[in-house]
Image (cartoon, rainbow, N blue to C red):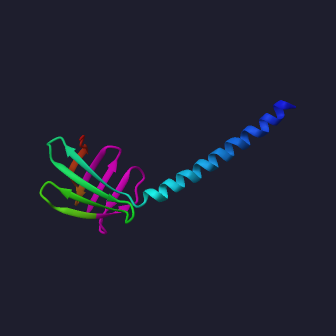
Amino acid sequence: MKKGVLLCVLPTFFLITSLLSGERDAEQNITNNDIIIKVTFIAKDKSVLTAVFDNASSTVIITMNNGKTFTLHRALSASGARYAEKEEKIVFWTKGENASLWINDQLIFSGTVKEN
């Protein structure tokens, strides 16, 4: 009899635990929506690209070595984060510590997060 009760209680416990942790994750995501994150990427040739991610507006502002800036909006991505301008001529991809910037289907920058 004790074994049967235990088998009924454990699945219920795990269900409640997973629901509560899901609620906690949702609250954390809501709080993190207003965060602005600045990340600097460095390429093998030592060129630098700075990305300022604004979660509230779903945008990223890219600044290149030459001072040129682009404001891109979050776009559909199967993996990683992808930002693009309306015509998709400028596309910025980031996944993990890697980032790439494409302009007119030409790779302009490829680098990784710069260590402080």
Left/right of residue 68 with respect to residue 28 in the rendered view: left
Q: Give the x, y percent position of residue 95.
A: 35, 47
Residue range (magenta)? 72-101
Q: Residue at x 16, y 61 (%)?
A: 68
Q: Residue at x 59, y 47 (%)?
A: 21
Q: Is residue 54 above or below residue 99?
A: below
Q: Give the x, y percent position of residue 80.
A: 38, 50
Left/right of residue 5 with respect to residue 58 in the rendered view: right
For the N terminus, which image quadrant?
A: top right
Q: Is residue 23 above or below residue 112?
A: below
Q: Give the x, y percent position of residue 11.
A: 72, 40
Between 64 and 90, the residue placed more toward the observer is: 64
Between 103 and 116, the residue placed more toward the observer is: 116
Q: Residue at x 37, y 63 (%)?
A: 58
Q: Residue at x 31, y 69 (%)?
A: 86
* Residue 13 belongs to the span the image colors magenta: no
Q: Is residue 95 above or below residue 7?
A: below
Magenta stretch: dominant SS?
Answer: strand
* Residue 81 belongs to the span the image colors magenta: yes
Left/right of residue 9 with respect to residue 34 in the rendered view: right
Total tally of numbered discs in the picture: 0
Q: Give the x, y percent position of residue 88.
A: 30, 64
Residue at the bottom extreme, as displayed:
86
Residue at the right extreme, as displayed:
1
